[in-house]
Image (cartoon, rainbow, N blue to C red):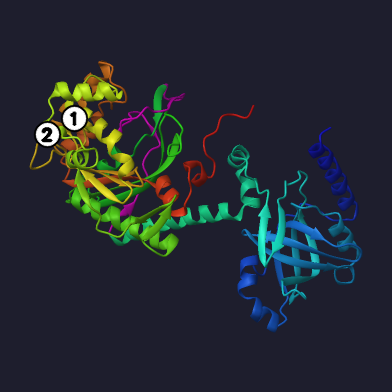
Amino acid sequence: MDNNADQQQIRLGKLEKIRNLGTEPYPYSFKRSHTVPEIIKQSEQLMENEQTVTIAGRLLAVRGKGKASFGNIQAQHTRLQIYVRLDAVGETAFEMFKLCDIGDHLGISGTLMHTKTGELTLRASVVELLSKSIRPIPMPKVEEKDGERIVHDEVTDKELRYRQRYLDLILNPKVAAVFQKRTLIFNTIRDYLRKEGFLEVETPTLQAVYGGANATPFVTHHKALDQKFYLRISNELYLKRLIAGGFDAVFEFVKDFRNEGIDRTHNPEFSALEFYQAYVDYNEIMRHTENICELCAIAVNGTTVIEYEGQTIDLTAPWPRLSMLDAIQTLGGISFEKMSDVEVKNLLKENGWELDADYNRGLATQLVFEETCETQLIQPTFITDHPKETSPLCKQNRENPELLERFEAYINGWEIANAYSELNDPVIQRRLMEEQVERGRGGEKETQPLDEDFLRAMEYGMPPMGGVGIGIDRIVMLFTGQSTIRDVILFPTMRPEA
């Protein structure tokens, strides 16, 4: 039997002894007067009034022998020292406490004091067991050095951290802080969009026709309808339906699903924000996008200037705008506009850059931009005026019909947003969707199917609008200093355990 199994058997034996003391190790509830963070915040007043307080939390350390022990209780990822004496809590409760292990949940009442070393401590008068743990927690080693708390051997195994996020959260308080900041980012965005007059809505995750992005969907089968369905790759077409239905401005936080690879910035299930506004174009959407990023940076870090992997990034609006062709010229050093198609094909071949479909000038332009420019876009930048072949859902540029009124926002070399002056001409929209279907039949990957219901909504009359999709996970990575998307998703996609 391995050591962990031995420890579980020992703990099961303690569980039986606790029951024999007349203690229920898994009670239904427990009433607290304060949380641990509240105790720490209000400690001076509570000590001055000698007020009895009641807390609950997880036992993460026990020290001492005989008739008195010290321990550490953690709740809301905050720790407080406790002091338990036989003569204060009584024989039965003290005997129960001696049978407790690291990982057990306790309820404790008492008054606050400072130890000789000045540490805030709860002097227990009542101790109750709230949950007996039977699996040992692999505790880190902690030492005090020059007044600083140093933690050794935290849970650093990435595989273990992602599979057992609950354990990661117990032992690594910094991880919990990342996800608290993630929620702060969501709330900051919600507050901004509501103040700007946007309505939060919900759209289907299961869709009979997928669309709104060029991506491979996950496929499932609806038994009752005997029909194939797809997990959403985007909510764009549904949000546009709502604008056609009369809403002036809508937004939605969604989980999108794309049956594609996993890497540092991609997870098959990811969080996105999309919002659409009637009677505006992509210029207004740029304003919203940079405002949102500014506000989120300030909410999380107190400033619009952030440090990320050695780079200082200034998110202060307004952000610079650069057309895709100008970016290729200035960042890539390639006079792309002056090149013939033969020269472009040679450029692709010489560099080993492959298109997913047969050659066309627009997709080649996009590919050259991605290969030569993206990684240089460290500071926030809007890349505007993409080739017309890159999206079937966007209006043509009003000055050059070969281009689209589309932008992508880049920070740290990552695309964090994609937006359009949205196409609302139903005749052109039908033609472009039909062309995509034909290209898909010809072997082009990740084309969008024809969505007759979406076209019908547009045919009733869809106002001009601007819209955007923003990758929330990448925003969280940037503003919390995390190096991989898995560090900002509570339960990232993993292979099944062997």
408 falls in the magenta region: no
State which tag comes first along the sequence, 2 or 1.
1
- Looking at the rendering, the stretch of residues picked out in magenta corresponds to 197-226
Residue 337, relative to residue 311: is it above or below?
A: above
Q: Position of residue 214 (x, y in %)?
A: 31, 30
**Marker disc for residue 362:** 1
Answer whether residue 31 is visible to the viewer in this image. Answer: no
Circle 1 SS class: helix
Q: Position of residue 252 (x, y in %)?
A: 36, 47
Q: Quadrant of residue 224?
A: top left
Farthest residue, direction left: 399
Label 2 Cα crowd, 10 Å radius (few <14 / some 14-19 / many 20+): some
Q: Quadrant of residue 76?
A: bottom right
Q: Amino acid at mark 1?
A: Gly
Q: Is residue 336 left or right of residue 67?
A: left
Answer whether residue 94 is visible to the viewer in this image. Answer: yes
> Marks 2/1: CA distance?
9 Å
Instruction: State which quarter of the image contains the N terminus.
Output: top right
Magenta part mainly helix, strand or loop? loop
